[in-house]
Each structure stands twice: as C-alpha cells, then as structure tokens.
Amino acid sequence: MILYDYILSASCYQVRLMAALLGQPLTTRAVNFHPAKEHKSPEMLKLNPKGTLPVLQDGDLVLTESAEILRYLTRDTPDWRGQDEVWLSFAAALNGSIGTARLHDILSYDADIDAVRRAGVQHLRQLEAHLVEQRFDGMIFLTGHTPTIADIACFPTTALAPDGGVSLDVYPSIRLWMRAIRSLPGFIEMPGIHRLHELEAAP
Amino acid sequence: MREAVDDHWYPVGLLSGLEDTRKTLLLGREIAVGRNGAGVFVRDAAGRALPTVARFGHLWTSPGQPTRDLFTIPEADTPGRQLVDVGSVRVKCSPLRAVENFLDIAHFPFVHTDILGAEPHTEVERYQVDIREEVDEVWATEVKFFQPQAARSAEGGIKTEYMYRVPAPTCAVLYKTCPPRPGEWDVITLFVQPLTEEWCEVWPWMALYDDQSTMAEMVSFQQMIFMQDRSILENQIPRKLPLDPGMEVPTQADMTSVAYRRWLKRIGYTYGAQLVAA
Ligand SMILES: N[C@@H](CCC(=O)N[C@@H](CS)C(=O)NCC(=O)O)C(=O)O
Ligand SMILES: [Fe+2]
C-alpha cells in the first residue's frame, strides 16, 4: 500500500495516523507539494486528476479522498466504524475553514482569512458542544466509548488550528478529546501535533 | 560607514517559483516580485525597479543602496551536491528571532525530539564563538552534539559537529558533518525575509551530499524540522529580539545568540529588535 504523502498535510496525516493505529504497514512516497507543486505534475495528475493529496494506491485501486481511504483501511475492523458519515463531512468542512486558515498563514495561500477563521470558530463550537454531550453520556470520543474513523478524520485539522491563528484554549472538551487520541497505542506525531510526553511527572 | 537596514540584501522568492507577479512585503513596505520576458524583477510600490541578485536558488533584493555584494557560500559550490529549494514558511515572529532560534543548538532534544536531539543527550559542550571583524560576520565553531537522526540520510545516532555562521543580519548558515562524506560539510541555511518587525517569511535552503533521498524527501524533512520551530517562534515573548543584556540569562549554549545580539547592536541593525527593557 503506497501513500503519496506530504508531511505538512493534515489530510495525509489522517491516513498515516490511521494506518499506525491499526498497525498496518504503509509505504509513504513524499511528494514535493510545496514549493514545487508536484501534486499537479503530469505523473500525479495521471494518478489523481484532481491534483490533491493524499492518494492511496493498493494494487490497481487508487483512492483520492481521505474519508474514502479511512473507510478502506478499516474495512475489516468494525470496531473502528460507527455513526461516522456526518463526521466525515464535518472533517471536510473543518478542512475548508481551519485548514484553509492554516495554509494561508503558513504557505501564503490566498484566502479571506477573517472569514475562514470565523467559520473555523463556529465549527469548533459545534465540535465542543457535541463533545460536551458525549461527556455527559460518559463517552470521550465522537461516536462512542472507543475511537472510530470519525475521530481520526476530525482530529488533525482541529489540533492544528493554532497554526492558522485559531486558539484552542477555550474548548476544554476538545482538549480532553485530543488528549485521549494522543494517548492511543500506536499514536504517531506530525509537525505541530506532539506526543504526550509533557504529561509525564514534573520534576 | 555601516549599512543601514535598507542597504542589506534580502531574499524575496525562489528563482524556480517565480511566476507572473507576487505582491509581498519587505521591511513593512509593499513590493512586487516576478518574472517577465526581460527576466526577473522587483519593484517598489512606486514602480521603481529595485536591484536584484540571483543566488542560492533565490532572488534577492535591497530597497536601499547596497554597498557590498551579497555574501557567498563557497562550500555550497563544490560539485555533487543536491541543491534543495525548501520553499517558504511564514511565521509571526521577529526576523531576528527566527535567526536566533536557528543558532541555538540546545533546543534540539526538546523541539526536534528523536530527530536532531534526544534526551538524555542534552549537554552542549564548550565551543568557540567569534565576531570576525575582517568579514563582519558571527561564527561559532567546534560545536558538537549527539543526534539520533542528523539528516534524512543518517541511520542511527551519531555525534555531529557543526559550525554556525551569520553572514548578514537576517541570514544564517550552518555547516554540519555529512554522514555519507566524512571531511565535507553539508550546508543548511535559513534566509529570512522581514515582512514587518514581527512577521517574516523564512526561506530555508540546503546544499547536501545525499544520493539516497529524493528531492521531495529532503524538502519534507526540512519542512518538518522548521515547522517544529514555528510554533515555538510564534509563542516567544517579547516578540522582538531584546538586544540589551540582562533580559534573558545566557547559558553555554546561548553564547552564539549572545554574540549575535551584540553584533546586531554594534552594526546598528535594530529592525525587529527591542532596545529598551520592556
Ligand atoms: N535537519 C536539517 C537541518 C535542520 C535545520 O535547518 N534546522 C534548524 C532549525 S533550528 C537547525 O538549526 N538545524 C540544525 C541541524 O540541521 O541539525 C538537517 O540536518 O538536514
Ligand atoms: Fe529548531
């Protein structure tokens, strides 16, 4: 299984993280997304005419949407599936708001930065409100007591909100949820999303 | 006569990435950077053409009257190196903070954990720091540090030796021992474009001996490293770099930073600096 990958992409990280949590071997192939725009190169466009990353190739199968890829990776692990559909679309919306703010702030992408940040804050409030309800019902994850692809789809963009100038300080339930994901066995980092070592006992 | 802030050279784009016209900021003023039939150009807001130099894969300009040529890096010219355009990352911090962080080896185990440093190997041994008057540069040499994965091509931990060089107020060059070629130095630079005093565009560039990694792998390795620094840089207080001693307590590892700040003060480079204790 080959992932055409970009290290700073939150969407590619969804795939890397999911495979790591499942213990599935994944070969990553680095694509020079920035600055060379290699995802728009003729070879990459042949694989994915949309010119986006991630792209997952497994034999003859080529998948070009992170949500599809998460479903594919968990096709034999029903524990990782729940009432996910609405959250997979929510993840796409987060990517449009907070994800765009991040690309604007880091890589100088064009965006109406105030508008996307405002939309991002609305999305975070929705997420916080839902996670509060979950906690009242004794659940820490988006759809239940255990994580599903819903969590893995929404976590990266949310956790990287500060990269786009959107603070997470005011969302205690989101912060607890992120901590729960970061403590899962097999968790891996990406730039901007750290492992939990700061939780270890202070001297 | 020392150069004023305006008289230095600044990076404003990748030669490989210049398309029509890009509007950007330099020292708080709008400029346009691009390529047309006649070649590359930089213009100020009044449409005046600014001087340009093409070097190290980047286009450089100066809004003032540069009295010296842009510095050179002779080591990067030796044949067989991969010249890596890493691309820019924008950071909300003083351009001088970005350079200072690059010079600080003590943060490796904490910020680049298990890559450029690892606990418990956090010790920085004594090394040599000079302000070289004849070339007007800051140099740190004989810097030795244990690294778990010193470069994309490195396997396993090694003790790496570094030299750091500040050839211009917003540029830093580091030379590090090169795992596949003992006796040669890999060259890794940080070229900083000051957008404003508290906002910059950082253009890392590298000239490496590495025949195992693809270009995309080398780019992504360096972007990963720099993004680990970015969140630290955006949270530093005060935002501007204090040039007066006494505000932060220096340790052995900070000797380069102390020399850098002293040198900035000596040459009167105050853009992005804080001169009076806050
Ligand atoms: N990691 C790169 C260089 C890393 C780099 O440029 N990072 C700055 C960030 S602070 C630094 O000082 N790096 C020292 C180093 O390269 O080891 C390499 O070793 O190939
Ligand atoms: Fe660093």
Image (cartoon, coloured by chain):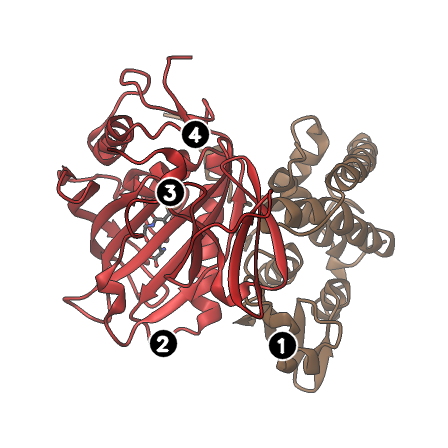
Chain colours: A brown, B red
- Of the residues under marks 2 and 3, which one precedes in the sequence? 3
Residue type, numbered disc 2 = Gln
Residue beneath the point at 34% across and 37% down: B100
Which residue is disc 1 drawn over?
A41
Number of marks in picture: 4
* Tag of residue A116: none
- Same chain for marks 2 and 1? no
Is B136 positioned to the left or the right of A106 in the image? left
* Tag of residue B65: 3
Q: Is mark 3 within 8 Å of ligand 1?
A: no
Q: Residues within 10 Å of mark 3 (few under 14, many from 20)?
A: some
Q: Residues within 10 Å of mark 1 (few under 14, many from 20)?
A: some
Residue type, numbered disc 1 = Ser
Between label 1 and label 4, give the one nearer the viewer. 4
In the image, residue A25 lies at what x, y percent?
55, 71
- Same chain for marks 2 and 4? yes
Residue type, numbered disc 4 = Gly
- The subunit letter for the residue under badge 3 reads B
Q: Residues within 10 Å of mark 4 (few under 14, many from 20)?
A: many
Which residue is disc 2 drawn over?
B212
- The subunit letter for the residue under badge 4 reads B
Between label 1 and label 3, give the one nearer the viewer. 3
- The subunit letter for the residue under badge 1 reads A
Q: Are marks 1 and 4 in contact (CB under 8 Å)?
A: no
